[in-house]
Image (spheres, rainbow, N blue to C red):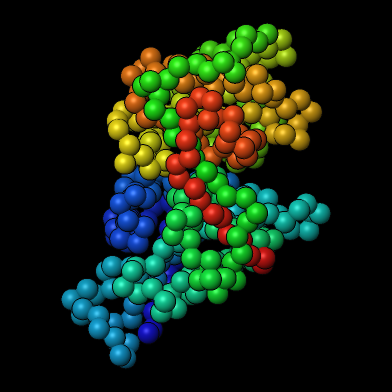
Amino acid sequence: MNFHIEELNAHTPASLPALVELWNLTLGAEFAISVPYLTQRLTHPPAWPAALVQAHIDNHSNNQSVNPNDNQASPAGLALLSAPPAALVSGTGSEPPQIHVDGLAVHPTYQRRGIGRGLVDWAVRWGKQHHGANLVLGDGPVRLLPGVPVATADHPAWAKLNFAPTPATRQDLLCAVASYVPPATVVEIPGVVRPLAPGERGYLHNFLETAAPAAQLSLRHFLAQGGRIADIMGLWTADGLVGAARLVVEDSVGGIEPWFPYDQPKPWAALQLITPRQSAPAPLAPTFHAALLDAALRRLHNMGVNTCILDDITESGMTDPQPFADFGFTPYHVYQPFTQPL
């Protein structure tokens, strides 16, 4: 089967509805996206190089049963790529960056016919042009999914494309916040948790320097898009701002779609914990983690929220879901990132 791959303008593509339809046909209703959501995901920070490519079947190919009335209007595959700003710099002695495949999909009709291989080969070439060390499927800060849903992850198929699973999965947790009751692990701390005020942006930006890179970018991007700073709960101690939690409701910048809550009762919310990296000089103690999470959940409860999804706990510096179980969280979506060297 013959097909060709073309690069689109990643910031103002004209074919978003067709690409969204392709994604939804491939991933199904559980991980469906909308045109506004894809548009938001394409607004990478300006310094980030990005590429959006689509594959089309050549109608004149031999041995094809392609509707001639389609006129190649519907894409057969898509790939969305991004690289951090450091990827533009070579010869500086800095560690080569990861190149992120933020989205990859092949129309179900055309799977196992070489289109996925063609898109990955294109991504490899693009990654090498941007001096990347690895190609990572999922796990990027502006990804459509954090990885391949574990329930459908076909490891042999990804191995044929030279991808190997990363050691850690990415997991979201679910809480019925309408019935939330603070657990016994919440104790008094020498500090206070409250919504941030507009005049406290400087404190927030200074604190983000201690957080994980993906969390830094996510929150800075949220603020740059006009996100409400009052949606961020801050944990304050004598040392200043030492932790934060971003509350996402349905009218928040970026919306609730990145957490795919469609099979849960409304109203929906998501929660992103931002704490110092575990390697930071002063990582957050468990009692402070608990105080921050409790304050965020109580606020969502008082807002009338029914379902809360806790964003990828690995980005909050924790990999063990057990402490979150004390707050009523249970496993929800689990994703497997894949990687290959460039």
Considering every residue shown, the one lying at the far right of the view is 93
Above or below, comparing residue 217 to residue 28 in the picture: above
- Where, quadrant-wise, is the C terminus in this rendering? bottom right
Number of disc labels: 0
Which residue lies at the image location 64% right of the left edge and 19% below the top edge? 288
Question: Could you say where residue 325 lies in the image, as x and y percent from the top left?
Answer: 53, 30
Question: Could you say where residue 94 lies in the image, as x and y percent from the top left?
Answer: 78, 52
Question: Could you say where residue 148 lies in the image, as x and y percent from the top left?
Answer: 49, 56
Quarter occupied by residue 175: top left
Quarter occupied by residue 276: top right
Which residue lies at the image location 34% right of the left edge and 49% below the top edge? 30
Question: Could you say where residue 233 lies in the image, as x and y percent from the top left?
Answer: 53, 19
- Where, quadrant-wise, is the N terminus in this rendering? bottom left
Above or below, comparing residue 68 to residue 116 in the picture: below
45 or 196: which is nearer to us?
196
Which residue lies at the image location 64% right of the left edge and 28% below the top edge? 275
Query: Would residue 166 be visible to someone looking at this image?
Result: yes
Query: Would residue 224 be visible to someone looking at this image?
Result: no
117 or 39: which is nearer to us?
117
260 or 59: which is nearer to us?
260
